[in-house]
Amino acid sequence: MSEEKSLNFIEEIVENDLNSGKYKTLVTRFPPEPNGYLHIGHAKAICLNFGLTQKYGGYTNLRFDDTNPVTEKTEYVNSQQEDIKWLGFNWKNELYASDYFDQLYAFAVKLIEKGLAYVDESTADAIAALKGTPTEPGQDSPYRNRSIAENLDIFGRMKSGEFPDGAYTLRAKIDMASPNMLMRDPIVYRIKHAEHHRTGNKWCIYPMYDFAHGQSDSIENITHSICTLEYVSHRELYDWFIEQLEIFPSKQYEFARLNLTSTVMSKRKLLQLVNENLVNGWDDPRMPTISGLRRRGFTPKSVREFCERIGIAKRENLIELSLLEFCIREDLNKTANRVMAVLDPIKLIITNYEKGTEDLIGENNPEAEDHGGTRVIPFSNELWIEREDFMEVPAKKWFRLAPGAMVRLKFAYIVKCEDFVKDEKGNVTEIHCTYIPESKSGNDTSGINVKGTIHWVSAQHAKTAEIRLYDRLFTSETPDAEEGDFKDYLNPESLTVLPTAYIEPALADADLDSRYQFIRKGYFCLDKDSTADQLVFNRTVTLKDTFKKPN
RNA sequence: UGUCCGAUAGUAUAAGGGUAGUACAACGGUUUUUGGUACCGUUUGUCUUGGUUCGAAUCCAGGUCGGACAACCA
């Protein structure tokens, strides 16, 4: 019954730990620093951590890693929570590293008392100079052997605000000759007179990441602390603090972070794009942020499916954007109603159509079980069709409109192109057709078969809308591996705005949750910039296109 | 010049000493009132050299290549 699906290496570790009885309950955490918006790489970690406890039981905490007050903001806390919820996950406890500042301070005191930490008054440069290099050992600080009493005294005065930023640091006393640079007496507390988004001005000393993360995990009884590969070398320190402090032994496991072609994933670079107005905010639909994907029209399900398909491993990877596109098409194909919209219009006149107007019936979604129901589509003798659906001199294998050629108008009749009109510049301005009355969609008795079916909108009934088309944000598949500034590789055509496209009247009551397939043009959703007067649609993704363009 | 991590089709990811499989991509076909969907098919792979073994992607050793590590960032 149960389809045998292979486990990733973390699931194997978890299963082993659970089966061996090492842990009775699985506890994971997702620990973002609230200094930016979450992106698709975070989605991978979110799906992993929450997915594990959904699968094996237990629970997942949301813990904000807020130990650096100068970069962190409540705005980010809020957006990160919204994004996680949107993805469909619920955390057990909402926690903050800053909740543990008192406890962390006590841990530091304990370390000093054990003779395992000391106050250093060297400058940052001096500390760096004695640090050594990856290939040469470092040297002891002149302050390394300060007495426990003196360390305790100065550390207390650091806390009480007696000293300016940078005057003193607290360092773990480990091994200045360790081959692991992180073990060369790492700084664990620094003085920072800065207001914290949660603790305000209560503290002027803040713990470093390494002194906060493992201990926070331990305090929460996190069984499997999962992070990305760049923390591999931190694991030795992570374990050292836990061992010396004699606290719950959380264990750290590392997996490879997600890289996606034609975009950047580092928060620093994304922040730059936002700050320099190279995109329109964190939720610009071209951004790889979760809020950007949401605005672009991605569904939570499609993002989760993507995270499932990319897998979890320790090898560096670069996932092709086409996989993300596949995931959203797969979802929307089954759920999005089909409608008609003409993005680049040209007039089509049916010369033998007498009636003023006629109501046709359109099926909403051939992929849905009930075909999604039907709707009314007004038809008349003057239509807008897509400019690219007409060729004055047809290419080989062209089965759209051309002089003398026939196509079906979707949901309507077969028409034959009899003539066309050009302006002085030689641009085609009108196409004249005759229609075949017996060819009406649904009861076609004409016996004529055409290869092409095109979409259209009745000119007299059409509404207008602004349509925004998106393309890859960067022209390079690996913008951060290129020479020079990654911003030099921004795609100037990543956004195309069509100010007045024609949409069928049924689209007038689109809402922000609706997803549509504009037949033959892709999947679209309403943008939040829409007003009562002006609807704005975003193209989420094009349809897969296997038609080899002529020329 | 050190320590650590990694290497399987174009891209990812399985196979845990016994038939190298799956997905995306690409290409071709069938169906189609979306050049969509669905379905079928094709191409492409174990970094290298040795060793252990009846048998190695898998275990061992050397090499090569890629990545991480010298923030009072996380």
Image (spheres, coloured by chain):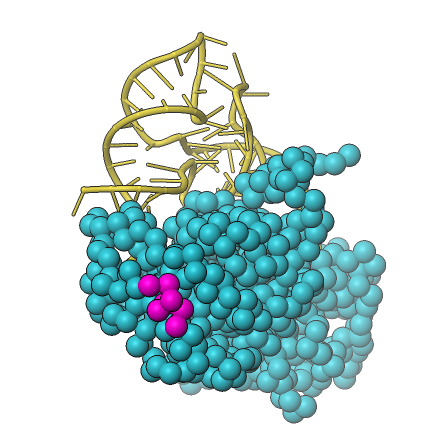
Chain colours: A cyan, B yellow
Side of B38 where B28 appears, left or right = left
Q: Residue at x 64, y 77 (%)?
A: A526
Q: Residue at x 68, y 90 (%)?
A: A532
The majority secondary structure of the magenta stretch comes to helix
Does A269 appear above or below B23? below
Q: Position of residue A258 (x, y in %)?
A: 47, 55
Does A56 appear above or below A396? above
Q: Nearer the viewer, residue A100 or A280?
A: A100
Specify start and end residues of the magenta stretch as a single range.
A147-153
Side of B3 where A108 appears, left or right = right
Does A329 appear above or below A527? above
Tell me which corner region of the image, top left, top right, bottom left or bottom right, holds residue A30: bottom right
Residue A150 is one of the magenta-drawn residues: yes
Check the image and name the residue furthest to the bottom. A533
Q: Quadrant of the N terminus of chain A?
A: top right
Q: Nearer the viewer, residue A336 or A126?
A: A126
Q: Nearer the viewer, residue A348 or B37?
A: B37
Q: Position of residue A55 (x, y in %)?
A: 69, 48
Q: Nearer the viewer, residue A446 or A187?
A: A187
Side of A51 where A468 appears, left or right = left
Q: Position of residue A164 (x, y in %)?
A: 33, 82
Side of B72 where A238 appears, left or right = right
Q: Position of residue A355 (x, y in %)?
A: 78, 81
Q: Residue at x 80, y 72 (%)?
A: A375
Tell me which corner region of the image, top left, top right, bottom left or bottom right, holds residue A452: bottom right
Q: Residue at x 62, y 54 (%)?
A: A221
Residue A330 seen by the camera: no
